[in-house]
Image (cartoon, helix red, strand yellow):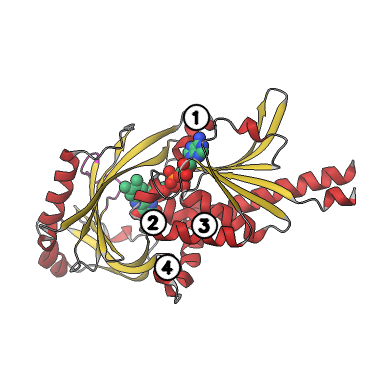
């Protein structure tokens, strides 16, 4: 009985994007006496996280079904986690940096519509009309200026992986066809498969939100621009506009195409992105293109799924904690979601220890 209570618990995290890696690190650093295995079809490339703009980007409206106060909690926990990393002497190897910039609107914002996140970011101010006219007269009517953080996932994911391996975590590269294969082998499965959960958790609410971007070299660009909308404002359809400088390059975006699975960069989208960028910021015209990329955001019409479920596979059953469906906000929310995931895993492990002890 005592031996069972003290038995090392086995957890498998499926998915090695920013959501899976942060969950794996959090679990292995928080829960005592646990063995964590990370399994993923892709590490570092061919996933939403590797294409992500990476801006800590508070939302104006709830993320589908996920309420605002929950988004704010997860976002704030991620912000608090990121600050010391951005200030660390190792920041260039971690990939998180501070960045000032403008969130801009095509219409005037009502005075009473001050954003809820204004005290969460640094140095927030409403942009005076004189400044808007001088810098962006032809495109934008109003906006906010503040400093936030940006995460360069091609650097941050390897950093998280190193932290995970240093704690004794195991990583395996392969596709998983069913969580049923883990029954009797692991105590808990953590499902961080992003869009892959459409098949592994049979979740019809998930669909891709295709995002095409271009990475360019533009060393003269030092602030971000983000085209944003308030409720009721008319947008640009399935395209938007952003400029995110980070680590010597600039990410230009981009598209928001619902239901599209194609990951080959389209020439038409690329032309739109480059034209729009140089129209708003002429200093970007003729920038050297480093890479055209497409990522599929895991968009879930019911919001982020962060909950525990017992999944049955015939006579077999397995405890699963789901953490997927972050759409265009996964980097902003990842650490808060990883903490909540760890709490749910811990609850399941404690419950099973108590049951075993009673037997
Ligand atoms: C163009 C673009 C710009 C973005 N900009 C921002 C931004 O500025 N700020 C922000 O906060 N967010 C942004 N996002 C959103 C953010 O990138 C995503 O929300 C986040 O990356 C989702 O991470 P994930 O780990 O859930 O999914 P992914 O990164 O897609 O990872 C999924 C993992 O699951 C694995 N997997 C799936 N199925 C299986 C299977 N059957 N077997 C084994 N492994 C499997 C994959 O191999 C992969 O390792 C952007 C996204 C895009 C595409």
What secondary structure is marked by label 1? helix
Q: Point out residue 166 in the picture as x, y percentages from the top left corner.
A: 59, 62
Find the distance from the CA under tag 2 to the CA under tag 3.
Answer: 11 Å
Badge 4 local density, few (<14 within 10 Å), some, or many (20+)? few
232 within the magenta span: yes
User: Do the numbered discs 3 and 1 sit on residues whose CB atoms are within 8 Å?
Assistant: no
Numbered marks: total: 4
State whether residue 38 is above or below residue 56: above
Q: Residue at x 36, y 69 (%)?
A: 98
Return the disc, 4 or 1, that comes first in the chain's sequence.
4
Find the distance from the CA under tag 3 to the CA under tag 1.
Answer: 26 Å
Find the distance from the CA under tag 4 to the CA under tag 1.
Answer: 35 Å
Q: Which mark is residue 154?
A: 2
Residue pointed to by mark 1 = 199
Residue pointed to by mark 3 = 161
Q: Is mark 1 within 8 Å of ligand 1?
A: yes
Badge 1 local density, few (<14 within 10 Å), some, or many (20+)? few
Residue nearest the viewer, comparing 273 with 72:
273
User: Do the numbered discs 4 and 1 sit on residues whose CB atoms are within 8 Å?
Assistant: no
Q: Point out residue 115 in the picture as x, y percentages from the top left corner.
A: 35, 59
Return the disc, 2 or 4, that comes first in the chain's sequence.
4
Find the distance from the CA under tag 4 to the CA under tag 3.
Answer: 12 Å
Q: Where does the magenta region start and end?
A: 228-238
State whether residue 325 is above or below residue 85: above
Residue pointed to by mark 4 = 93
Badge 3 local density, few (<14 within 10 Å), some, or many (20+)? many
Q: Is residue 184 left or right of residue 208?
A: right
Return the disc, 3 or 1, that comes first in the chain's sequence.
3
């Amino acid at each position: 009985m005592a031996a069972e209570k003290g038995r090392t618990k086995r957890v498998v995290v499926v998915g090695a994007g920013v959501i899976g890696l942060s969950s794996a690190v959090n679990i292995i650093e928080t829960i005592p006496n646990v063995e964590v295995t990370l399994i993923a079809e892709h590490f570092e490339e061919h996933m939403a996280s590797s294409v992500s703009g990476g801006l800590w980007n508070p939302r104006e409206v709830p993320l589908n079904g996920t309420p605002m106060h929950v988004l704010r909690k997860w976002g704030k926990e991620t912000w608090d986690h990121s600050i010391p990393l951005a200030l660390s002497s190792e920041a260039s190897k971690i990939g998180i940096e501070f960045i000032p910039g403008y969130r801009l609107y095509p219409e005037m914002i009502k005075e009473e519509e001050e954003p809820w996140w204004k005290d969460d970011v640094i140095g927030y101010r409403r942009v005076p009309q004189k400044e808007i006219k001088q810098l962006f007269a032809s495109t934008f009517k109003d906006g906010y200026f503040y400093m936030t953080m940006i995460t360069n996932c091609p650097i941050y994911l390897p950093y998280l992986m190193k932290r995970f391996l240093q704690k004794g975590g195991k990583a395996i590269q392969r596709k998983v066809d069913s969580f049923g294969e883990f029954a009797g082998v692991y105590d808990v499965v953590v499902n961080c498969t992003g869009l892959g959960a459409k098949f592994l958790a049979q979740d019809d609410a998930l669909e891709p939100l295709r995002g095409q971007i271009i990475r360019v070299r533009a060393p003269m660009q030092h602030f971000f621009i983000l085209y944003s909308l308030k409720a009721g404002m008319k947008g640009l359809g399935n395209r938007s506009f952003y400029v995110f400088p980070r680590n010597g390059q600039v990410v230009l975006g981009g598209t928001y195409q619902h239901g599209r699975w194609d990951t080959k960069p389209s020439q038409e989208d690329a032309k739109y992105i480059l034209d729009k960028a140089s129209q708003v910021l002429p200093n970007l015209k003729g920038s050297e293109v480093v890479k055209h990329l497409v990522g599929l955001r895991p968009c879930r019409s019911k919001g982020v799924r962060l909950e525990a479920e017992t999944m049955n596979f015939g006579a077999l059953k397995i405890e699963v904690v789901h953490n997927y469906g972050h759409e265009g906000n996964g980097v902003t929310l990842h650490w808060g979601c990883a903490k909540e995931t760890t709490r749910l895993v811990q609850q399941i492990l404690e419950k099973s220890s108590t049951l075993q002890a009673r037997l």
